[in-house]
Amino acid sequence: MAAVGRLGAFLGEVRTEMKKVTFPSREEVVGTTGVVLITSVIFAIFLWIADLVIQRLYQGLIDLFLPGS
């Protein structure tokens, strides 16, 4: 029975804490979503270019040390 009492107390505390939570407005959500999308695209382009550079470096090393392969 003590577990039921603790569960009730816990749920009461959860309700109290949820009343303190503030949720973002639609404008804030749209704005931060835009920032995340733009940042993701920038990082994707950066990583794509870095991958190309590393790939060319490795290919150059292979051509240097293993000619004809």
Image (spheres, grey):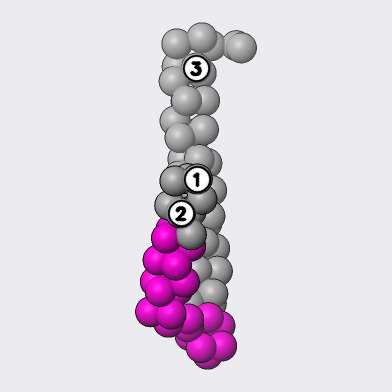
Quarter-of-image position of residue 65: top left
Q: Read off the residue under disc 1.
A: 1
Q: Which one is in front, 22 or 25?
A: 22
Q: Read off the residue under disc 3.
A: 62
Indicate the position of residue 68 as horizontal and vertical percent values: 60, 11
Q: CA distance from mark 3 to mark 2?
A: 70 Å
Cβ atoms under marks 2 and 1 closer than 8 Å: yes
- Does the stretch in magenta take in 18? yes
- Does the stretch in magenta take in 61? no
Q: Read off the residue under disc 2.
A: 5
The amino acid beneath tag 2 is Gly
Element on which disc 1 rests: loop
Asked if 56 appears above or below 50 in the picture, the reply is above
Q: Earlier in the sequence, mark 3 or mark 2?
A: 2
Query: Would you call the spot at circle 3 few (<14 residues within 10 Å), some (14-19), or many (20 or more)?
Result: few
Front tag of 3 and 1: 1
The amino acid beneath tag 3 is Ile
In the picture, the quarter occupied by the C terminus is: top right
Q: Residue at x 48, y 77 (%)?
A: 32
Cβ atoms under marks 3 and 1 closer than 8 Å: no
Q: Residue at x 46, y 40 (%)?
A: 53
Q: Which one is in front, 54 or 64?
A: 54
Q: CA distance from mark 3 to mark 1?
A: 72 Å
